[in-house]
Amino acid sequence: MSKPVIATASLAGCFGCHMSLLDIDDRILKLVELVEFNKSPIDDIKTFTKPVDVGLIEGGCCNSENVENLRAFRKNCKVLVSVGECAIMGGLPALRNGIPVRECLEEAFLNSPTVAPEDRIIPNDEEIPIVLDKVYPCHEIVKIDHFLPGCPPSADLIWEALTALVEGRPLNLTYEMIKFD
Ligand code: SF4
């Protein structure tokens, strides 16, 4: 019988939630037995090659590429999970919300004391995704089925939720596993 398929993505995230997934330590050997990975930075598969049972999303949406990627995950994944505070509510990157994008770009690329005078230019190439007016949580872009809080969520929480979802068990997420920082 074929294994359940999972996929993961980091949008406007820091890869800390992926590190927490890897923090399941030796259970990673069980995970490899239990599931097959499709599109994910963990295996470097860049495009979906088959339907996915569970998609894990780290990070919210701060640019046009994040939105495209998230929509592709929603289209290809039966169950989609927001992993971590960035995916759930924008997280720390959302601290820029409320500041005009132009002001953020000018601060980073024109006015910062660490930018050499000859490098003072706001990047503007069609290859670079367009920065959104603010950082959006994933559920404001697509339907999200489950939310795993934490920055990052604990490895135990990710393990319990993921194994329950791929095995078709109800999620048994205890108070001890859940944190919001
Ligand atoms: S929730 Fe925390 S650990 Fe996860 S991507 Fe955001 S900042 Fe990183």
Image (tube, rainbow, N blue to C red):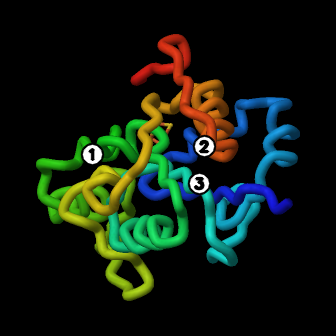
Q: Is residue 43 above or below residue 162?
A: below
| Element on which disc 3 rests | strand
Inter-mark Cα distance, 1 to 2: 29 Å
Q: Which of 67/121 is in front?
A: 67
- Residue under label 3: 54
Image coordinates for residue 97, horizontal then vertical, percent: 18, 49
Identified at 83% across, 48% down, the residue is 32
Image spot of residue 18 (x, y percent): 62, 44
Can residue 20 be seen? Answer: no
Image quarter of residue 1: bottom right
Viewer-nearest of labels 3 and 1? 3
Say if mark 3 contacts mark 1, CB within 8 Å: no
Q: Quadrant of residue 128?
A: bottom left
Please name the residue that numbered disc 1 is placed on.
94
Badge 1 element? helix
Give the amino acid at mark 2. Leu
Q: Which residue is mark 2?
A: 165
Ligand 1 closer than 8 Å to the CB at disc 1?
no
Label 3 or label 1, whichever comes before in sequence order? 3
**Residue at point 76%, 61% (across, down):** 43
* 148 to 172, vertically: above or below: below
As drawn, 122 above or below 110: below
**Crowd band around label 1 with a 10 angstrom C-alpha radius: few (<14), some (14–19), many (20+):** some
| Labelled disc at residue 109 | none
The x, y position of residue 10, in whole percent, is 52, 55
Q: Is residue 108 above or below residue 181?
A: below
Instruction: Check disc 1 and give the amino acid type.
Output: Ala
Residue found 68% across the figure and 38% down from its top: 163
Q: Are marks 3 and 2 in contact (CB under 8 Å)?
A: yes
| C-alpha gap between disc 3 and disc 1 | 26 Å
Q: Is residue 180 left or right of residue 141?
A: right
